[in-house]
Amino acid sequence: MTCANFLQTYVDWIKGGSGTDEHFVSLNLISNDTNGPARYAEGRLHLETSIISPEIPLSFFVGEATLYESNERWGFPSDDGSFSLAEFPFNPRTTDKIKVTINLLTPSITITSSTKGKAIINNPQCSNNLIFGFVTEGSGVLGVGGFPDSGFPLPFRPYYVISLTTGSIPVP
């Protein structure tokens, strides 16, 4: 299945909402790079369309997601509320907000953060209900991995995997 066909099923889902419910697409994102933390994000995407010419509407999935990183460990509280020395990845108190944009025409994915940089994945692959690929352009830890100032981004390019699911909520 091509990425265009894969993404079209989610466009159709969003456009198929009725007057009593709003359809949306949920995003789950994971990434890792050679020497950096694992990252996990979750959020919702909505459909935006802009007209670059009367014949070419340009559509995007756009949304905000909460980003968790495994280098931000979490050790308190334990399951019973007492102090714990055990460390768990993905501290829920030290998250970051990212913006995820999926260009439906090209397709390409842009992930941006005001504190962690930018990652662009051109020509991602789509298979088994996943979108995935290496960063092709970027800056900061999102774009070049654990060594943002190394000057050698290619060996440390992060790899991103995104899954999408559909959902709906009642319209008030």
Image (tube, grey):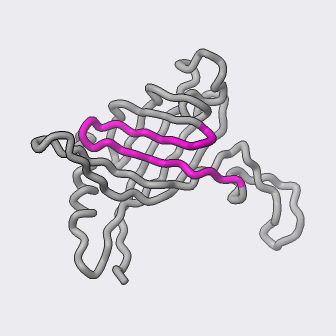
Q: x, y (%) of residue 53?
A: 15, 40
Is the residue 153 above or below the residue 41 in the image?
above
Q: Is residue 149 left or right of residue 118?
A: right
Count up the numbered dots: 0
Does residue 137 appear in this view? yes
Q: Residue furthest left?
A: 55
Magenta span: predominant SS is strand
User: Residue 121: horizontal and vertical position, in percent?
Assistant: 41, 33
Image quadrant in which you'd find residue 146: top right
**Residue 109, x across and y down, in percent:** 39, 39
Magenta residue check for 92: no
106 magenta-colored: yes
Q: Is residue 106 left or right of residue 35?
A: left
Q: Residue at x 57, y 52 (%)?
A: 97
| Residue 131 sits in quarter | top left
**Horizontal side, residue 43 vs residue 7: left or right:** right
Q: Residue at x 49, y 34 (%)?
A: 119
- Which contiguous range is marked in magenta? 94-116
Relative height, residue 56 to residue 129 (above, below): above
In front of the other: 140 or 28: 140
